[in-house]
Image (tube, rainbow, N blue to C red):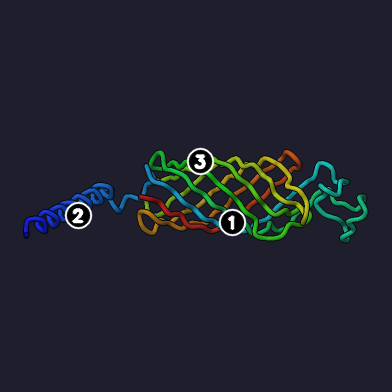
Amino acid sequence: MKQPYFAINFILTATLLLAIQTAAAADSRDPTQRDHKFQGVVNITTGTGWYMVAPYDKNDPRKACGYEDGDEGNPDASEPVCTGRSSWYMDFLGGFGVRPGLELLFMYRQGLESPGPGNPQTRRIGAGFKFYKPADTLIKMGFGIIPLFDFSKRTEGSAENGDFVIHVPILLQFDIVRWFGAYGQVAPNISFVSEFRFDINFGIGIQGRFP
């Protein structure tokens, strides 16, 4: 009667030891080495910024960036160049570290405020890369280039407006542990298809890496 129980205990013990050995082998990386090689990456960033926009046709109410004295019914009152605070945004990034200091990334940006003249509700999606120097230290610099397709909403009830954006994140990251870090970021953004627009965003974010 004891043989079946002995066999079951032996199998369970062997399975547990194998699982522990496999986990130890998978996590054999030096915990002091904070590089990104062969790790999945998840980032969340939020912030705001400042923009300058110059519409190609300032007399088209659908494209005008703003109006003097709020006179939206008068095309002659539309402004050729507008500046102001960019709306709050949230960035979601996922990717993979192909080298110790190089990540390939997919990014989606969602604006968190209602759209207005010259300051649409941001919606962008694209992919690019980011590299870090030095790659395996507690504090590191990051730089990336991420081309984005922009389908932001300009005004309430309007259709999305297609554009192309070059997003250039520049960041200082503090890796608290090997698999988790926090960072501050400055990111110029340039778009030029439907209008000339320059944004500089300021944000903070966190990064998780696995395994």
* Label 3 residue SS: strand
In the shown orientation, is residue 78 left or right of residue 131? Answer: right
Instruction: Tell me the crowding category of disc 2: few under 14, some 14 to 19, or many 20 or more residues within 10 angstroms, Cα based.
Output: few
Check whether the beta carbons of the residues at disc 2 and disc 1 lie within 8 A of each other. Answer: no
Q: Mark 3 is on which residue type?
A: Phe
Callout 2 amino acid = Leu
Q: Residue 67: horizontal and vertical position, in percent?
A: 86, 55
Residue at 73% in and 54% down: 119
Whole-number angstrom distance, CA of label 2 to CA of label 3? 40 Å
How far separated are the C-alphas under marks 3 and 1?
Answer: 19 Å
Q: What residue is shown with label 3?
A: 129
Q: Farthest residue in the left direction? A: 2
| Residue highlighted by disc 2 | 16
What x and y, as percent, mark residue 19? 23, 51
- Residue 146, how many percent across, how many down? 57, 42
Q: Residues within 10 Å of mark 1 (few under 14, many from 20)?
A: some
Q: Which dot marks residue 90?
A: 1
Estimate how packed mark 3 is, as few (under 14), some (14 to 19) or many (20 or more) residues with alpha carbons within 10 Å: some
Spot occupied by residue 201 in the image (x, y as percentages of width and height): 62, 53
